[in-house]
Amino acid sequence: MSVRTPVRIAALVVVIIAVVALLRNAQTTAAARRRAAVPTLDSMATPSASTGGGNAQRGLALLNNFRDSLPTHSGNALRCTSCHLDNGTRGLPWLGSATKYPQYRARPGYSENMERRINECIARSLAGKMIPEAGRDMQDMVAYMESLRNQPRPPDNPQVKLVGQVASGRDGYAGQCARCHGANGEGVKGLAPAVWGPESYSVGAGMARQFTLATFVRHAMPYDRATVLSDQQSADIAAFVLTQARQDHPGKERDWPNGDPPADVAYATDSASRAGKPMPPARQLLPRRVSQDSLSK
């Protein structure tokens, strides 16, 4: 054996140890950021009378721990802050959202109040069962939204409207996303949510749309911002993720009843079919775990 061989082996071991340390540090940093983002009671505005006297602090706890708090209404492992990052202050922020409702929304085809909008997220993103709008749980979540009413809302991020390449996205996911979200999209408990499979959002969720997911990936991922992805990389990763199986959302064909679905909707709608619009390719769908339509119109 050459005298240099042990030296080379030792150097290789040092490199491997350094890489492992960097990955662990990135995960630790991400977890620390999540803990640091939890607001104190003093930082929250007192809920207004319009919220029915809800408790903002309890509302935040529900939003952060939906499955543990409301297990009969949860259909996957996600929580509201899986997408509305850092307690709704980043990614898809809730800042100032309370000022926007009620508002007309094209997907249901009617005006929604804040309670109905939250229930839509429960049914679609959490693949869950809607909760009573006048109940304590809902009113506490609304109270948290109200506590952010006067917080400055950042400008909307530019949408990434590029065609994604699935093969490139597979490589991009493995290199940039799997360290937190798992090689098979299953997520890592306490660190990052599932991005496909039975524990992830349903096909009816906004995140199941190509442009929406690509834009989120581009501007909010990786969570620790260890790297900054390009528009094309983000589109490719989104395209790959959205080819994977996820829970169905029964009744999705009734969405956008006025025939105006966005170009990246992941499923066929009755109104688009009647208008002769091209149908999107079929997605891999998993059976629904719980019924979402107990309060649906």
Image (cartoon, grey):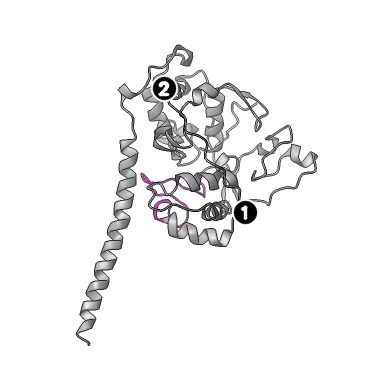
What quarter of the picture does the C terminus occupy?
top right
The answer to whether residue 241 is above or below residue 80 is below
Q: What residue is disc 2 on? A: 147
- Please provide percent x and percent y for residue 206: 57, 39
Q: Is residue 285 magenta?
A: no
How many marks on residues?
Answer: 2
Task: Work out how far the residue at label 1 is from the one at label 2, CA to CA, in angstroms.
Answer: 38 Å
Q: Earlier in the sequence, mark 1 or mark 2?
A: 2
Residue pushed farthest left? 3
- Please provide percent x and percent y for residue 205: 57, 39
Which amino acid lies under the numbered mark 2 shown in the image of this protein?
Answer: Ser
Residue pushed farthest bottom? 1
Residue under the image location 48 percent in, 13 percent down: 50
Residue under the image location 30 percent in, 48 percent down: 28
The answer to whether residue 238 is above or below residue 168 is above
What quarter of the picture does the N terminus occupy?
bottom left
- Please provide percent x and percent y for residue 49: 45, 12
Q: Nearer the viewer, residue 28 or 141?
A: 28
Q: Secondary structure at mark 2?
A: helix
- Please provide percent x and percent y for residue 201: 53, 42
Residue under the image location 30 percent in, 60 percent down: 20
Which amino acid lies under the numbered mark 1 shown in the image of this protein?
Answer: Val
Which image quadrant is residue 89 in?
Answer: top left
Local crowd at mark 1 within 10 Å, few (<14), some, or many (≥20)? some
Q: Secondary structure at mark 1?
A: loop
Left or right position of 230 against 32: right
Q: Which residues, given as a range, are shown in magenta?
A: 179-200
Residue under the image location 77 percent in, 44 percent down: 277
Q: What residue is disc 1 on? A: 163
